[in-house]
Amino acid sequence: MAYTEAQKKATMKYMKNNLDDIKIRVPKGRREELKEDVKALGYTSFNSFVVEAIEEKIEREALKHE
């Protein structure tokens, strides 16, 4: 089944109303290496890995400063 314009519009509306974007920059070629590394670790979503990594880092840093 093809992805319809209505589905695309609904997805874009959902994203606009429910999600924020964070853009990061890495050296050329590194993006694909990182994506492969994340996949090798068993993650299906690069985004979920990044969010989890950020949350873990914040938690560790907060514990250091207690």
Image (cartoon, rainbow, N blue to C red):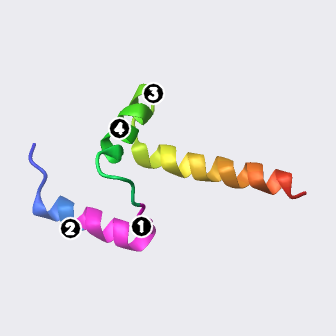
Give the residue number, with chain letter if any, for mark 2: 9
Measure how far apart labels 4 and 1 are at the Cα level: 22 Å
Q: Earlier in the sequence, mark 3 or mark 1?
A: 1
User: In which quadrant of the rendered image does the N terminus lie?
Assistant: top left
Residue at x-position 57% and y-position 46%: 52
Q: Secondary structure at mark 2?
A: helix
Q: In this picture, which residue range is highlighted in magenta?
A: 10-24
**Main secondary structure along the magenta-highlighted residues:** helix
Work out how far the residue at label 4 is from the one at label 2, CA to CA, in angstroms: 32 Å
Image marks 4 and 2: residues in contact by CB distance under 8 Å: no
Q: Of helix, strand and loop, which one carries label 3? A: loop
Q: Is residue 2 left or right of residue 28?
A: left
Identify the mark nearer the N-term, 4 or 2: 2
User: In this view, which residue lies farthest toward the front?
Assistant: 27
Q: Residues within 10 Å of mark 3 (few under 14, many from 20)?
A: few
Q: Are marks 2 and 3 in contact (CB under 8 Å)?
A: no
The residue lying at 41 percent from left, 26 percent from top is 40
User: Label 1's element?
Assistant: loop
Q: Residues under labels 1 and 2: Cα distance?
A: 18 Å
Residue highlighted by disc 1:
21
Q: Quadrant of residue 5?
A: bottom left
Q: Name the residue that disc number 3 marks.
A: 42
Identify the residue under disc 4. Answer: 33
From the image, state whether disc 4 or disc 2 is nearer to you: 4
**Residue closest to the eye, 55 or 6:** 55
Q: Nearer the viewer, mark 2 or mark 3?
A: 3
Q: Give the x, y percent position of residue 60.
A: 75, 48
Observer-side mark, 1 or 2, equals 1
How far is the residue under mark 2 from the one under mark 3? 31 Å
Q: Amino acid at mark 3?
A: Gly
Q: Is residue 38 above or below residue 17?
A: above
